Amino acid sequence: MEPSTNEDAVRSLVRRESLTNFGFNVVINGGLAAWLLSGESELTAFGAAAYGPDLLITGFLLSAIVGSIVVGTTGGKVRKGALVAPPQLPAPWLDAAAGWSLARIAATIGVVGAAVAALSVAVFAVLTPTLSVTAYAVLKGLWCGLLAVGIVIAGVRIGVRRGAAAIGPATG
């Protein structure tokens, strides 16, 4: 595969990874929620039959796992020459994160995902006091898919910077 040297290649990677992660997470997380909660009739944000803890845990784990995979694989593509990092606009938070260990990046992205989940649970609880299992499974699947897309966008950008920093200044 010939190395890519422009922003279009990074955008193409973001598009491809976003679609893949969206579809995978819609199916897996929505399906697991439907299966694991099938014995319940209604769910509330918190309580005996609740979706709040599930979404908070999912927000952290999904974000940490997808984030570390995307950052690691993208950085590897840059280091191997399969993707040449285009010139980067200044982005202090991305530059700072690119210098962290992969574990620190994963933990930080996980905390951000859990915070997004907490905000989402609050919004869902205000909008509807209860959800059927089917409604929650659909909601969770779509929510996880959208969260994964956000993680992919940030993860590719961090990975490109990590890979470029590992090999030195960009040549394209």
Image (spheres, helix red, strand yellow):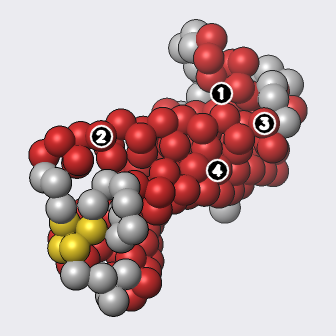
Residue 14 vertical position relative to residue 135 in the rendered view, above or below: above
Left or right side of 115 for 124 = left
Residue 133: x and y in percent read 25, 77
Q: Quick check: marks 1 and 3 in contact, CB under 8 Å?
A: no
- Residue topped by disc 2: 122
Spatial distance from mark 1 to mark 4, Cα to Cα?
A: 31 Å
Mark 2, Cα crowd under 10 Å, few <14 / some 14-19 / many 20+, is: few
Spatial distance from mark 1 to mark 3, Cα to Cα?
A: 29 Å
Name the amino acid, label 4: Ala
- Residue topped by disc 1: 172
Closer to the camera in the image, 163 or 52: 52
Mark 1, Cα crowd under 10 Å, few <14 / some 14-19 / many 20+, is: few
Closer to the camera in the image, 92 or 82: 92
Q: Earlier in the sequence, mark 1 or mark 3?
A: 3
Residue 136: x and y in percent read 26, 68
Spatial distance from mark 2 to mark 4, Cα to Cα?
A: 22 Å
Q: Residue at x 81, y 29 (%)?
A: 100
Residue found at the very far front of the displayed protein = 48
Closer to the camera in the image, 96 or 41: 41
- Residue topped by disc 4: 64
Q: Earlier in the sequence, mark 2 or mark 1?
A: 2
Q: Which mark is residue 104?
A: 3
Query: Which quadrant is the N terminus positioned in?
Result: bottom right
Name the amino acid, label 1: Gly
Name the amino acid, label 2: Ala
Q: Residue at x 79, y 21 (%)?
A: 169
